[in-house]
Image (cartoon, rainbow, N blue to C red):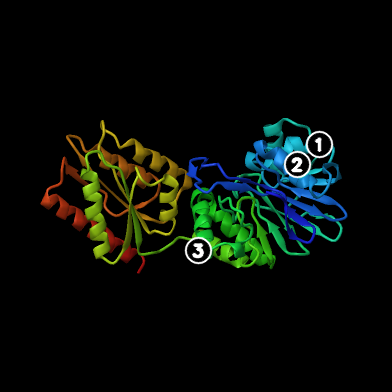
Amino acid sequence: MHPIQIADGIYDVGVNDWNVRDFHGYSTPTGSTYNAFLIVDEKIALIDTVKKEFANQLIKNITEIVPLEKIDYVISNHTEMDHTGALPSIMHRIGKDKPLYCSKMGQKNLAMHYRNNWNYHAVENGEELHLGSRQLTFLEARMLHWPDSMLTYEKKDKILFSSDAFGQHYAGYEKFDDQMDPETLLNHSKKYFANIILLYAGQVQKLLKTVNDLELTFNMICPDHGIIWRKRPDVILDAYAKWSEPIASKKAVVVYDTMWQSTKMMAEQICEGIVSEGVNVRPMNLRTNHRSDIMTELLESSALIVGSPTLNNNIYPTVSDFLTYMKGLRPQNKLAACFGSYGWNGASIKILNSELASMKFNMIDAAGLKIQYVPDDSGLNACFEYGQKIGKAICQSIE
Ligand code: FEO
């Protein structure tokens, strides 16, 4: 894509990655973008770069606006390589003595990534950089989502360059929120939050508090991935405020895999029981639902119910994969229960209970529900009643 002017003298010079389908275990069926921003004033600044393999496209985009050597400052909001992979190419071409602005931790991390002795300028929180008519302020955003993360605020047009925060993994010819269906955009944002930002919900609240305390307002929020918020930046700020708080909803997710359909039969009856209590439930078979889509569904659910057959005295590999992924994202304040079929050793239930309890889920029932081999009518009835018990617990938890 060619550069796009997003404000007077400010351009998105980033790239679309149409083909990326996996981001650290997060499925990205619509690709992603690596946004980078060029501010042309009396002085010229480049904010962030792109993945290494897109360096030539970034360079081409910049040179459509200014010769590379005219860049006075490079600002790195975050070290992760989707935003710095092209940095060595850029620094080499613009002159390695040009100042590279980043956080203190950014300086350490960039040095360890690229083993280069660039002309680092490690900024203090709140430090300013004057470009002429425009003035940039650097805001510390430690652990949102790396120790080096910072944000850059442009005062004149009230533009927040927000690094990974407020982004989406979405590649398209649309560039702004007013060019996209609002619900689709919010769903992409939700998946991104559930799979990248969730672990750092506390830091999101801290950032929103800083924004309030400093009475900052934004005309535009420019994340490093996906769509720029220019019409309704309040939509994504409000969504982050909601998603970073504990969520109480009459909604549950039933996640399972099955060996000979018995655990599937159990899952379906448990869902029927949950629904009969007026709770919305989504059954998600791990063979047909990606772990990152399950996390998205879980974000606004009050309870997670996990089912696994016992396989060789253990849980199913797909269930283990999901639990490992979820453990890293640390969802908070949710109920949980577990179930599964077994042959001669019902170890899966004990393992599931222990795993979920270790992740600080509030267990509805310490025993779980296990059924030997294939459930008969009375077994299916027990599953329905188990679902009712779960549904009642969810309703009580949000009263
Ligand atoms: Fe988009 Fe943390 O990198």
Q: CA distance from mark 3 to mark 1?
A: 42 Å
Task: Point out the frontmost of discs 2 and 1.
Answer: 2
Question: In screen coordinates, is 130 left or right of 370?
Answer: right
Q: Amino acid type of disc 3?
A: Glu
Crowding at mark 1 (Cα within 10 Å: few <14, some 14-19, many 20+): some
Q: Quadrant of residue 343?
A: top left
Residue pictured at 37% horizontal, 51% vertical? 361
Earlier sequence position, callout 2 versus callout 3: 2
Crowding at mark 3 (Cα within 10 Å: few <14, some 14-19, many 20+): few
Q: Check whether the beta carbons of the residues at disc 2 and disc 1 lie within 8 A of each other.
A: yes
Residue pictured at 34% horizontal, 58% vertical? 252
Q: Which residue is mark 1?
A: 93
Question: In screen coordinates, is 104 left or right of 338?
Answer: right
Q: Amino acid type of disc 1?
A: Arg
Residue pictured at 16% horizontal, 40% vertical? 373
**Residue 292: x, y in percent?**
45, 47
Judging depth in this view, the residue of 388 and 180 nearest the camera is: 180
Q: Which residue is mark 2?
A: 59
**Residue 183 — which label?**
3
Earlier sequence position, callout 2 versus callout 1: 2
